[in-house]
Amino acid sequence: MYQKDGEKYFIVDSHMHYWNAAPDNWVAGAEQYAKGWIECFHAYQGLGPPKTHWSIEHFQKYSEDDLMKDVFAEGHVDVAVFQPTYLKEWYREGFNTTERNALMGEKHPGKFIYNTRFDPRDGDEGLVTLRRNIERYGSRGVKLYTAEWNNGSRGYKLSDPAAYRYLEAAQNLGIKNIHVHKGPTIWPLDKDAFDVSDVDHAATDFPDLNFIVEHVGLPRIEDFCFMATQEPNVYAGLSVVIGGLMYARPKFFAKVMGELLFWVGEDKMTFGSDYGIWEPKWQIEGFVDWDYPGDEFSDYPRLGAAGKKKILGLNAAKLYDIEVPAEFQLDAGQGTPAERDDARLVEDDAQLASGA
Amino acid sequence: MTASPATARQEAAQHEAAQREAAQQQGARARILAALETVRDPELDEPVTSLGFVTSCTVSADGDAQVRLRLPTYFCAPNFAFLMVADAYDAVSVLEGVRSTEVVLEDHFASGSINGGVAARAGFVRAFDGEAVSELHGLRADFLRKAVMAGTDQVCRPLAGGGAPAAALAGLTLGMVPPSGALDRLRQRRAELGLPAGDDAPLLIDPLTGSPLRADEVPLHLRRAQTTRVSIEANAGICRGMLRHRYTTAGLGEEDSP
């Protein structure tokens, strides 16, 4: 929890990792990809405040103690959601798997939620694994990385028939939240890999699932916004937005926040530190203090303490049925976290007609 | 021992020739750099030079040019990377005095396919055998349309700030808008897409069909234009930050964003 100016914030870090990307985990013959991937992540860390930067060696493999200190002891987080990314073509035991996360998390009851993952290209066998992981770890959500390489394939779309088969199976097994992360490769390579229209299709066809688009679709924030505003079950995962922009590009951060608040709304945005890319502490403290830096942003919706409480924890708590103590709840009239009704067809919006 | 007058004359002539050659090379290199300024990152709609993507540029006395490019990450999308390398090749290879051109993309997971494909003039589908079904014209056009939307915000924001109601912009033509760099850029992008770009063309059009917008469509159109611009500019900010972390030296012609 975090307290500032008399306000108490319950913090859910809805997107974080416990990875091993050190050379001892690199697949022979694929070392350049394993190295390139973690160096790319490390460059993202470079967008945070210099005093929070780690050496590449530390970044490749941080310890359980590091995580518990950075995220909980010093990082203000109450509950953290592990989002696995496998990348087994490059990392022998996977980059951060459901098993690795749970093995660590089980030593700290009540602190973690174990999401799992699936890859629709894994056929019947993948469905068996999905069922086993859900039963064993109590997963309520899955993390999907559509650009993952798999047996010569460079990725997939959520609208592929195989993906629908998996979404249906996941839903039947009790999964509620689908975290989608786009990356630079899919098949075919001549199409825009970051296009989010496949999420649009899936969200329409699976209305009982929530689709949390991580990194708000970056680098396609505009496509994400235009889609999310029309889909009641699409949410904006803020990982990378706060970490990558708030310190490095404060003016762009203000504009991106303004756009998200306008199109998506504070009920449907969720904080994620993306730890180990960035530590949550500076992100949470900076976000609680944040306001638009000047008059040029006066057209954008304001964000007050109630909105920040929703974004930093209450929205994700609702999505994951996390119990929130009364002292952190909103007062009457401050809205309902994770409220789906916010979505509307912008064509009908009176705000637009006024030219705002 | 002193040199004979004949040797001194010879040396002077050699020196002069070397200087002439160096000046010629200097000129050729400047022309290549100017040509690279016309090559844009299709996603960010900015020259590869100002983004810091040009590592080096050399040209031999015989006119053999080599351009080295770099990107913010090892995993930057291969389709856009291919377009930049191919466009750089096209821009440099047509220059007078350039006999051969080599463009090398460094430190990228698909460097081999991209560099080889461009050098062989093979096209994207052949460079990525089995992984692509068509060339990149459609992708390029999609992103030019985004650039048109972002450019629309750049041109219209000052007009709206001047008090013009959004819907009134529907009646304007490009010729009625005060000249600016942003307007020139918008016209250029529209022309590249084959959309009307002359003085009598409407200021606000659908970038897919080219048809003029009705007054009631203008507010949403401008709102979307604004979001598109914010998105592109935020991406460029992130790319610049990643590039700076990855490489300590500035690229040729690199500029920070405003």
Image (cartoon, coloured by chain):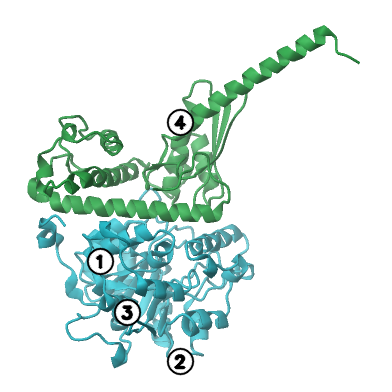
Chain colours: A cyan, B green
**In the rendered structure, which disc, 2 or 3, sits on the residue that comes first in sequence?**
2
Give the residue at mark 1: A261
Question: Which circle, 1 or 4, is nearer the viewer?
Answer: 1
The amino acid on which the numbered mark 4 sits, given as a three-letter code, is Ala
Q: Output the chain of dot 1.
A: A
The amino acid on which the numbered mark 1 sits, given as a three-letter code, is Leu
Q: Are marks 2 and 3 in contact (CB under 8 Å)?
A: no
Give the residue at mark 2: A109
Question: Which circle, 1 or 2, is nearer the viewer?
Answer: 1
Give the residue at mark 4: B35
Q: Judge if badges 1 and 4 mark residues of a common chain.
A: no
Give the residue at mark 3: A316
Q: Judge if badges 2 and 3 mark residues of a common chain.
A: yes
Q: Position of residue B150 (x, y in %)?
A: 28, 47
Question: Which circle, 3 or 1, is nearer the viewer?
Answer: 1
Q: Output the chain of dot 2.
A: A
**In the rendered structure, which disc, 3 or 1, sits on the residue that comes first in sequence?**
1
